[in-house]
Image: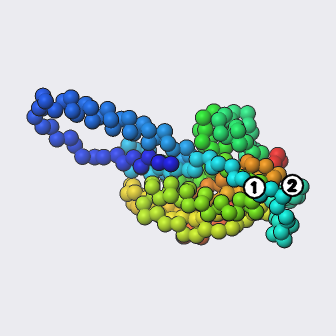
Amino acid sequence: MLAPQPAIAGSAQAIQRPVKKSKLPLVLGILAVLLVLAVGAVGAAYFFLVIKPRSEKRPVITRHEPTPQPTIKSTQNQEPTPSDLGNTNTTGTEVPPYSPPAGAVQFVNSKKNLDGKLAEHYVDFSFYYPKSWQKDPKAGVPGARNFVKVERGLPPNYTLENFAVGLYASAGSVENDRAAFHALAEKLSSQFAESIGNYHKASEGETKVGLYDGYEFRFEGLSQQTDKGQFKIWGRAIFLPPVDGGNNGVTLLMLTTSLAPELKSVDDVGEKGDLPMLLQSFRFGKP
């Protein structure tokens, strides 16, 4: 999938030159072709995360999230292995309730306002986030690209930490998906590489979100120049297969920057700051 490149507001003034009558049709033709190509590139993007200053003269960095992945075919009549027997992503697993701190807000996913792929791959889940965070009104509504997105920001409109939950088509368990995880991570990583300066995938492998088994990769890069200078970008993407053996899992996407004073490296994503609350409180199913 081709993702659009970051939009950079230019400041150079146009230089007026003598008009040559014979060039006008050629120029109009070129502009028409470029317009068609630009519309096609924008239409190819499915998910996005944005870090941007509000002024049109400041650089804009656009984050692109994954398009829905095709369902991974599970192996029929597969004999259980020791890892299957110990797998926490199984039907009937009891996950202890989360005790939220004061000032926490609970998000509960709902199918009510969803359409398209999000409605088709709907998943019940919930989590808590700090009351000071902002919920993106463009998520979880008709035409949305995420079930939910919440963010901790810095005025006027800079990201410190954000958390988005998107769809993930699964074969029903970590064991069945394990062979495909690396390819999924490579595909999503390549999308981030197109829009993040000095992009580097820092690590990849199995992980846990509470008691849920999953697979993740972490990445880092640099922002464009802003009125706060050039800051570091750290991110983490986690694929979580469903707990009911179905095909609808979730992708957890976390994006942070060095503008958050307590974050010092990619290893801190989801480990320091406010994001640990969101991961620790994440639960599949209805609360």
Classify mark 2: residues with Cα within 10 Å, few (<14), some (14-19) or many (20+): few
In the picture of the structure, the residue carrying the numbered disc 1 is: 74
Here the colouring is rainbow
Q: Can you see residue 118?
A: yes
Tell me the CA gap for discs 2 and 1.
Answer: 17 Å
Instruction: Please indicate whether residue 156 sits to the left or right of residue 16 in the image.
Output: right
Instruction: Please indicate whether residue 6 sits to the left or right of residue 69 in the image.
Output: left
Q: Which amino acid, mark 2?
A: Thr
The quarter of the picture where residue 22 lies is top left
Residue 136 position (above or below residue 101): above
Q: Which amino acid, mark 1?
A: Ser
The quarter of the picture where residue 223 lies is bottom left
Q: Position of residue 226 (x, y in %)?
A: 39, 55
- Which residue is rendered at x = 38% and y = 43% of the image? 56
In the picture of the structure, the residue carrying the numbered disc 2 is: 91
Query: What count of labels does the image hold?
Result: 2
Residue 174 position (above or below residue 12): below
Q: Can you see residue 100?
A: no
The quarter of the picture where residue 84 lies is bottom right
- In the picture, the disc for residue 243 is none
